[in-house]
Image: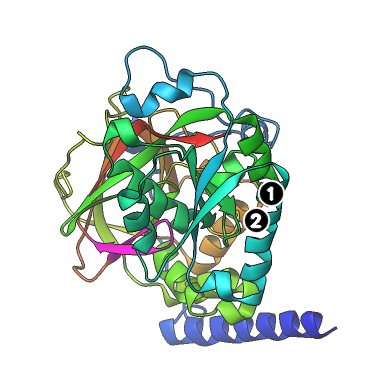
Amino acid sequence: LAASARRRMLKLALATTAISMCMRRGVGAKKKKQQKMDPFDDISGIPALRPSKSDRAVSLDPKTPRLRHPVGGANTNANASANASAKKIKTILLVLHGVKSKERKGERQVNNVRARALLQDIALIEVVTERAGHCEELVRDASLRGVDAVGVMGGDGSLREGVCGMLARPASDRRPVFVFPVGTGNNFARDLGHRDVKDAFDAIGRGVERAVDVVKVTHPGGSTYSVNCVTWGMARDAAETAEKMRWMGPVRYDVAGFYHIAKGKANLAKITASDDGAGGGDAAAAAGKGGGEGDGAYDDYMMMFAQNTRCSGRNFKFTPSAELDDGKFDVVAVRKCGMFKTIGLFDKVKADGAHVEDPDVCYVKATRATLDAKDASDLVGIDGEVNVKSPVTLEAIKHAFTTLV
């Protein structure tokens, strides 16, 4: 009853907020005649994908194969093990979150991992993070002599740090990186069919490695990698707001999203994309320069997503056709539209990804993209954890690291 009452109060608060903001902005006082716009059918000449409901259902079905592009031909040393037969995982470097692992829920999760490792006769070498970004340093600098794989406890943000650390090592001294999915979103793990710690240990037991992609993000302060999603605009702003409302539980994503939809902030940017059909190269050698490459005026967008995974946030299906190993990332750009239509688009995202059929949405696959925001204070989010300044260049790095499947 308490939970039900809480939901009713939240809905009432949202409705009140919507009416108040609409009145302040003059929505409903006088309906303006809006100019009809042409469909948003391409980005830099790449035609929009419009997967049908049946196509999306197949793509989002848990039974659909998640990795369909195995390594073939000449590859880097980092990928060589992806073609090898399954091997016995005997020792794992386990990275624990310094704060969450000491909380009651975190302690239960860590004890669960320890107990399952004991049952499977797996040795754990535990290291604990002390600050944001420390996971990357621990993985980068650790001695991996005798270590068969690196496991990170957390979600997509924690996995990103582990992958960045592994990619900073010499190619000949890398190991598969995987996540025990105990974070908020766990979208990368979900795309592999790993929904909990038991699924992760099943993959450890199989000992099968596969190479997967990352997105290299080059920005004014340097470069980093993304394993899940790069976001800009309303969606990034809402995710940041939701982080400050963790006390509300999962509903915080809906509340934060609604708030920023009603706020209606202008998001002016130049967005470009290209597809060379090859999907980048070796992660250690890839290079790019930040900065939008398009000419002309800035356009007003609601948001942009660039993803390796099908979902982001709390299972939001922004890029339903994305694949982890195809050498490309999926880009969704949404033009600014009315508040109530925006709410409808988010309902479609949460349901089955039907937003990709809307004429105000452009969905493409790319190997490279740029975003140049007009407002210097605009930030670009990476895997829900890191924020960098615009302009940014995104580059797909095919088969950059290996993970357990």
Q: Secondary structure at mark 1?
A: helix
- Dot 2 and dot 1 residues touching (CB under 8 Å): yes
Name the magenta segment's main secondary structure: strand
Q: CA distance from mark 2 to mark 1?
A: 6 Å
Q: Is residue 387 magenta?
A: yes
Residue found at x 62% / y 62%: 110
Q: Left of 3 or right of it: where is 157?
A: left
Residue found at x 43% / y 61%: 384
Residue found at x 23% / y 36%: 284
Q: Position of residue 273 (x, y in %)?
A: 28, 38
Residue found at x 68% / y 80%: 11
Circle number at residue 208: none
Q: Residues within 10 Å of mark 1 (few under 14, many from 20)?
A: few
Q: Which residues are magenta?
A: 379-389
Q: How many marks?
A: 2
Q: Is residue 392 magenta?
A: no
Q: Label 1, on which residue? A: 118
Q: Quadrant of the N terminus?
A: bottom right
**Residue 130 against residue 96 in the figure, above or below:** below
Q: Is residue 68 visible?
A: yes
Circle number at residue 114: 2
